[in-house]
Amino acid sequence: MKLQGEIDSMKEMGRGLIVSCQALADEPLHSSYIMSRMAAAAKEGGAIGIRANSIEDIAAIKKEVDLPIIGIIKIDYENMKPYITPTMKEVDQLVEAGADIIAVDATINQEEEFLKEIFKKYPEQKFMADVSTIEEGLRAGELGFHYVGTTLVGYTDHSKGINNFQVLDALIKDCKAKIIAEGNFDTPEKAGIAMKKGAYAVVVGSAITRPQLITKKFHEEVVKAL
């Protein structure tokens, strides 16, 4: 278990671009080594932080770059909707791994008691709430989350069709936490707009680190022109 002093020494997340370096088991670039090199490339390009999935990837990335890391563990449990750091087991693992910020599902699908418990157990650890609606973001701010991300807007059943900029605007205006724009801010223009609106930082993932999806977009446009 991490000592309190070790948690206190975690890196602070500055303002700017955070790059999500993730590749799941069924993706071509699934490899902790490759994700560490992705993180190095992101730093070279100007990223001020990395979002990473799994203990193995976090360990590899920490050896490669000295940027602050938002750590998550994606795992599916039977009869449980949340899959981003859904239980205390994953929180414990991420604390032990030295994640500077730990992101958890903080939608209405997650039990509020769990969200309160993580602060009781780790009062000095910084946490990020991944939310999908304005109401969820406001609740996360009240619960004491340091960061609130629009990560899951459009990905939960109850947020289908909601505009991510609408959620972003409302949370910047009314939420107590620092607001991170994440989820479909997939062009430089959208990322810039989010920052101009007052987002603390912007997380971009697939548009930078998933070449199969980037290639697919180009492929579709090329095929249209044939």
Image (spheres, rainbow, N blue to C red):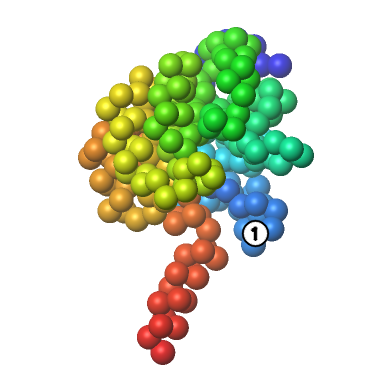
158 left or right of 188 in image: right
Within-10-Å neighbours for mark 1: few <14, some 14–19, many 20+: few
At 69% from the left and 40% from the top, the residue drawn is: 75
Measured as percent of width and height from the top left, residue 7 is found at 57, 16
Q: Circle 1 sits on which residue?
A: 27
Residue nearer the viewer, 221 or 40:
221
At 57% from the left and 40% from the top, the residue drawn is: 52
Location of residue 104 by image quarter? top right
Residue nearer the viewer, 102 or 111:
111
Measured as percent of width and height from the top left, residue 220 is found at 45, 76
At 38% from the left and 86% from the top, the residue drawn is: 225
Considering every residue shown, the one lying at the far bottom of the view is 226
40 left or right of 190 in image: right
Task: Residue 34: tell me if it is visible.
Answer: yes
14 left or right of 22 in image: left
Measured as percent of width and height from the top left, residue 164 is found at 37, 44
| Label 1 element class | loop
- Image quarter where the C terminus lies is bottom left
Considering every residue shown, the one lying at the far right of the view is 78
At 36% from the left and 19% from the top, the residue drawn is: 176
Residue nearer the viewer, 222 or 171:
171
Considering every residue shown, the one lying at the far left of the view is 196
Task: Residue 146: tell me if it is visible.
Answer: no
50 left or right of 225 in image: right
Tag count: 1
Measured as percent of width and height from the top left, residue 192 is found at 27, 46
Q: What's under tag 1, amino acid-wise?
A: Glu
In this view, 173 is above or below 123: below
- Image quarter where the N terminus lies is top right
